[in-house]
Image (tube, helix red, strand yellow):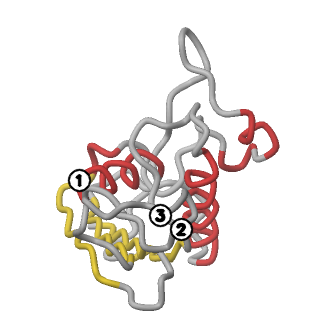
């Protein structure tokens, strides 16, 4: 599918999921990302994933982007350290593409059973993250305490 300089962008109100967590307990973060990606693609009128080169822009907004020594109060602490930018980028790259098949040692989290449109075997924006030829990413402080991120994929 050749589309030109089409851009798909979306926001997710939570932290980005970490790489390779399809079967883990934080599947809710992956589901939020994949639902937002699919909606953004459909809103653009694009029916299928893209197979050409793409550029990825990621901005992660969080109240604590640098203080890794901050003592967290609990898991819902809005001041908690958001994490390493490279891990957040890798997670976004992992989940806008087709994931692994359920075979051998891989089993997706049970939450995906009720969401076949965003199941791991579905490519959403791109088929494979090897298509990404440029990445721009940054963490920005967010003073209101709301952790969220903005993803923009440009088809080249």
In what quadrant of the picture does the C terminus appear? bottom left
Q: CA distance from mark 1 to mark 2?
A: 17 Å
Residue 15 circle label: 3
Q: Earlier in the sequence, mark 1 or mark 2?
A: 2
- Crowding around mark 3 (Cα neighbors within 10 Å: few <14, some 14 to 19, many 20+) is many
Residue at the spot 57% in from the left edge and 55% down from the top edge: 29
Contact (Cβ within 8 Å) of mark 1 with mark 3: no
- Crowding around mark 1 (Cα neighbors within 10 Å: few <14, some 14 to 19, many 20+) is few
Which sits in the foreground, 78 or 9? 78
Contact (Cβ within 8 Å) of mark 3 with mark 2: yes
Q: Which residue is mark 2?
A: 14
Say above or below: 107 vs 148: above
Residue at the spot 29% in from the left edge and 65% down from the top edge: 56
Say above or below: 1 vs 97: below
Q: Earlier in the sequence, mark 1 or mark 3?
A: 3
- Crowding around mark 2 (Cα neighbors within 10 Å: few <14, some 14 to 19, many 20+) is some
Residue 86 circle label: 1
In what quadrant of the picture does the N terminus appear? bottom left
């Amino acid at each position: 599918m050749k589309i030109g300089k089409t851009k798909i962008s979306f926001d997710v109100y939570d932290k980005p999921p970490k790489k390779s967590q399809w079967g883990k307990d934080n599947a809710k973060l992956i589901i939020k990302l994949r639902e937002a990606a699919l909606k953004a693609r459909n809103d653009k009128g694009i029916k299928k994933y893209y197979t050409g080169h793409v550029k990825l822009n990621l901005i992660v907004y969080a109240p604590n982007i640098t203080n890794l020594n901050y003592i967290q109060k609990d898991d819902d602490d809005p001041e908690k350290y958001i994490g390493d930018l490279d891990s957040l980028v890798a997670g976004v790259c992992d989940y806008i593409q087709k994931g692994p098949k359920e075979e051998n040692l891989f089993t997706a989290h049970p939450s995906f059973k009720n969401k076949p449109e965003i199941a791991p075997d579905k490519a959403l924006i791109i088929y494979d993250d090897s298509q990404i030829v440029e990445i721009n990413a940054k963490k920005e402080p967010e003073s209101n305490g709301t952790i969220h991120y903005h993803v923009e994929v440009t088809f080249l």
